Amino acid sequence: MSDLKSGSNLEKVLKAGHFAFTGECGPPKGADVEHLKEKFQYLKGNVDAVNVTDNQTAVVRMSSLAASKLMIDEGLEPNFQMVTRDRNRLAIMSDILGAYALGIRNMLCLSGDHQTFGNNPQAKNVHDIDSMQLIALVKKMRDEEKFMNDEDIDVAPKMFIGAACNPFADPYEYRVYRLANKIEAGADFIQTQCIFNMDKFRDFMKKAVDMGLHKKCYILAGVTPMKNAGMANFMSKFVPGMDIPASIIKRLKGVDKKNQAEEGIKFALEQVEEFKEMKGVAGVHMMAIEWEHMVPEIAERAKVLPRPVV
Amino acid sequence: MRLSYPADIKIIQVPCTGRVDILHLLNAIEDGADGVYVAGCLEGECHYIKGNIKAKKKVEYVKKTLAEVGIEPERVQMFNLSSAQGARFAEIANEMVDKIKELGPTPIKKNHAA
Amino acid sequence: MIVADQKSLKEILAMVKDNKKILIVGCKGCVTVCNVGGLKEVEILASIMKIARKKQGNDIDIDIKVLERQCDNEYVAEISDIINDYEAVISLACGVGPQFLSEMYKEKIIYPGLNTTFFGGATEHGVWEERCAGCGSCAIHDFAGLCPIARCAKSLMNGPCGGSSDGVCEINKDTVCIWDTIVQKKIKAGQLEDLIGVKGLKNWRTARDGGPRRSIREELVQGNI
């Protein structure tokens, strides 16, 4: 046990060599705890950890820190997301300590969507540090037990450090090096952007494996089941950094509207099957956006249940 | 060609409409002109390459600016014709005068006189 | 240069709605170069303001003056003889101008006629773009000669983020992803290794974050000569 970095369930599952399966849950646009608890129930027991998003798409929601704590109280393990858009280094370090004190053991380090996209475009964006530096900061606090200014921490936060990777953003040829930088900075695990372009992802993973990155870090492939062709179209056109091949949209359109959700799930399940076999992929991050109630069925059909207890 | 055009118009000659300045147009309105228009060469036929295009942009700027302070932008216009189109010149003059008559006297003049 | 935009006429007219006699002061520095606060623009603003006020039947007297610069007191002092003839002054300069005027003419109402936008340059006639954030510790040589602090929407030191697509930033199609440009330039020069590794935290003390800044060149300070 002593060689564990944080002792989180996610870390233990990955370290034991199991194929990890993580979920995602967006806190409410309000303080509706009951609704949040309801969403937790769909995820409980079906995933190893749940990402709790931090004002995703720059829309104000219940804080990811508070929602992560509520999640712990319900017996699930959160993967606390933190963006550098809204906090300077003081707030970041203090929230990391607070998160650890509340029992949070996984953290995903992000820069965050620019506030232009959200419902407070007038806001000042902080960006005191960036996501790469956040990874390094969490690692320093954990391993050196020091703050960024080299002052000692009395009880250091021992986090399992996550980072994001978007193989579909440009410039493509640099993306694998940026991933390597994140791993060098201290990322223990990576969750990728939603994957739809499987050809490109296979190529990307080959490059990552050739560089040996999969041995330094657990790479979880991002999957989002499409609810319908309209959603695929929308994401393709309006969500930055999304690469949705025309063939996927065509496949969804090819079936009756009422069967499109099933077709979307089928595609996601096919992806999961391939990822189980793909060299360098340590698990799947299932982002069923506002579709949490489908997670039990998806997990069941993906044959990832029961989740290992380690 | 002995074409007549309305006596309401005072012609100010410039070597090229590129010489027309935003201030010339604004000062005319400021000093009580009911309207002002620029008659330039046909687009693509400027002797100085782009003089009339520059004038067009300045006229657009003045129209936009006047509209912002509640003056009818139609009081400032740009027309394009060649020096051989005498009849067209008279026609434009009549067109402009009719337009201004329709708009009525400038809202600037009466205050200015006061 | 410092780039600025003129405030809307509506805003400027509202500022001086109760004034009958004002002075508009232009500046021959940056704002003349970016065509927003030089003699021409001062004249145009004066004319359109007079038109607007005449239309309201509430004429306004406007005189104009263009100073060599509004950011040096010796030039700001040039209007000391005339300033008391006016109820208020509109400064067509970057944000420095109206403050130097306010500091020298303490009793006078000074209105800013411009919105100061950024440090930049003209990329084509009539188009200006931001290049510098004035952070006080230039490191463009670490980024292929391009500044991610000023030009990346998230000021990333370790970019590009996942929103970079076809060389364009996620915030809008008109914004270049400067990190894409940096990476492409480095790859082309065979210097990709410069982008391997993590760039450490920036020290923002030299930027505005450290409080208002001051530069002293001892050899030029009068008391020292």
Image (cartoon, coloured by chain):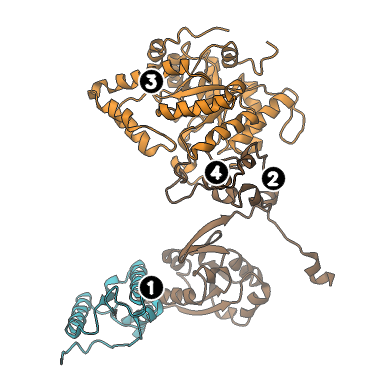
Q: Say which amino acid is labelled 3.
A: Ala
Residue at image mark 4: C154
Provide the secondary structure element on which disc 4 rests: loop
Amino acid carrying mark 2 in the image: Asn
**Same-subunit check for callouts 4 and 2:** yes
Discs 3/2, front: 3
Q: Residue at x 43, y 18 (%)?
A: A274
Place of residue C186 in the rendered image (x, y in percent of width and height, measured from the top left): 58, 45
Amino acid type shown at disc 1: Ala
Q: Is residue C109 above or below residue A144?
A: below
Shade of chain C as shown in the rendered figure: brown
What's the amino acid at mark 4? Answer: Lys
Task: Sort mark 4 into few (<14), some (14-19) or many (20+) by Cα contacts within 10 Å.
Answer: many
Tell me if label 4 and label 2 are in contact, CB under 8 Å: no
Which residue is under mark 3?
A268
Mark 3: which secondary structure?
helix
The residue carrying pointer 3 sits among few (fewer than 14), some (14 to 19) or many (20 or more) residues within 10 Å by Cα, namely: many
Give the x, y percent position of residue B25: 36, 79
Q: Position of residue A3 (x, y in %)?
A: 69, 14
**How far across and down, in percent of the image, does residue A122 sit?**
48, 47
Q: Estimate the spatial distance between the alpha carbons at disc 3 and disc 2, rounded to whole Å.
A: 44 Å
Query: Callout 2: few (<14), some (14-19), or many (20+) C-alpha neighbours within 10 Å?
Result: some
Query: Which mark is in front, 1 or 3?
Result: 3
Question: Same chain for marks 3 and 4?
Answer: no
Please, is residue B96 above or below residue A133 in the view?
Answer: below
Question: Mark 3 belongs to which subunit?
Answer: A
Instruction: Tell me the colour chain A is drawn in.
Output: orange
> Residue tagged by mark 2?
C203
